[in-house]
Image (tube, rainbow, N blue to C red):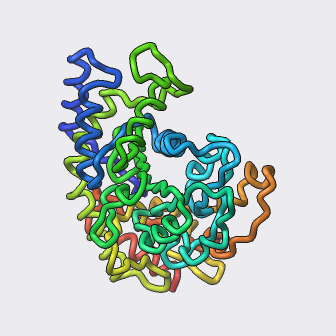
Amino acid sequence: MISIANPLIGEEEKQAVMEVLDSGILAQGPRVKAFEEAFAEMCGAKYAVATSSGTTALHVALLAHDIGPGDEVITSPFTFIASANSVLYTGARPVFVDIDPVSFNLDPAKIEAAITPNTKAIMPVHLFGLPCEMTPILAIAQKHNLVIIEDSAQSHGAAYHGQRVGSFGTGCFSLYPTKNITSAEGGMVTTNSEEIAENCRVIRQHGMRRRYYHDELGFNFRMTDVHAAIGLAQLKKLWPFTEARINNARFLNQHLEGVVTPTVPENSTHVFHQYTIRVPNGRRDEVLAGLQAQGIGCGVYYPVPVHQQRVYTELGYAVSLPEAEQAALEVISLPVHPALSSADLETIVAAVNGLVN
């Protein structure tokens, strides 16, 4: 079996955890602070605030920008549901804009038509590890005085024109086990604003600026030192992991036939959280079943766009977003993780080519 994801946990992570356990400081402590500083440096941001998950990172970031009831946040329908749900958690309303069919990311040309007097923010999702086209998105945000909340959950280390994602606006990362690096579970908010960073710290810790003095409604969204210790060890491996993903994707691009392979713009560094192909002509499910029968782990990310999920249709969402809807019928993500061997890659290529040709 070739797995679609394979978290690489080594002796460094195990030793780091044992050091935390031996220290007796298990909750949010010095390892969290060190992880935040190292993560901010990786992103090219001034500040980073660790949270308990990627979803809570999004929730905290939105609240830190005072987004709430009556506000609208423009985002993608082709993403994990947490992107949109985090907007609902604040009492605001997600507004979906269709994707570009090549990048699978939010189509900048369609954003302005969705802006209303209630629009407060744009949440571009750097899907599968490919940065969104940030130049036009930033221009639109500046023109309309909108906040940028980057959903960078799948794009650790990705860059657009040499600038790392998570540094264009307020970045939100996931550290779930299947991500490019993991802390077992966790999230991170990145920002260049001292005010937003402080807001995030207060919100994640019960609204406290001073211990046991609660100035506002907050949450328990903290990261433990155990998780941060794993994350610190993983962060040191991010670049070799990323190089392996890029090399694996390059091999697949060069050898796959009969499918639409990922395109990487010259201005972007794609870090391939997922390697996602399109299988046209209504054959996706046939190819998916064939790969699974041959022991090749693969998945459909995502089979139902967010605006068509039951929870959203029951909220009255009835918009048509044809590019996202078509992508959901054609995409398959293949293994691309750093643990793949040359033989694994050749097996994947042979299986796909045999099924589509």
Q: Is residue 24 left or right of residue 125?
A: left
Q: Position of residue 17 (x, y in %)?
A: 25, 28
Residue 233 vertical position relative to residue 318 in the rendered view, above or below: above
Q: Position of residue 271 (x, y in %)?
A: 34, 64
Would residue 291 be visible to someone looking at this image? no
Would residue 94 be visible to someone looking at this image? yes
Q: Is residue 346 left or right of residue 305?
A: left
Q: Position of residue 257 (x, y in %)?
A: 44, 85
Question: Which one is in front, 136 or 238?
Answer: 136
Residue 63 vertical position relative to residue 170 in the rendered view, above or below: above
The residue at 49%/69% (across/down) is 137
Question: Which one is in front, 291 or 209?
Answer: 209
The residue at 70%/59% (across/down) is 307
The residue at 41%/79% (across/down) is 263
Quadrant of the rendered structure where residue 68 is?
Answer: top right
The residue at 44%/37% (across/down) is 200
Quadrant of the rendered structure where residue 230 is?
Answer: top left
Figure disc tally: 0
Question: Which one is in front, 144 or 78?
Answer: 144
Quadrant of the image containing the N terminus:
bottom left
Q: Position of residue 355 (x, y in %)?
A: 51, 78
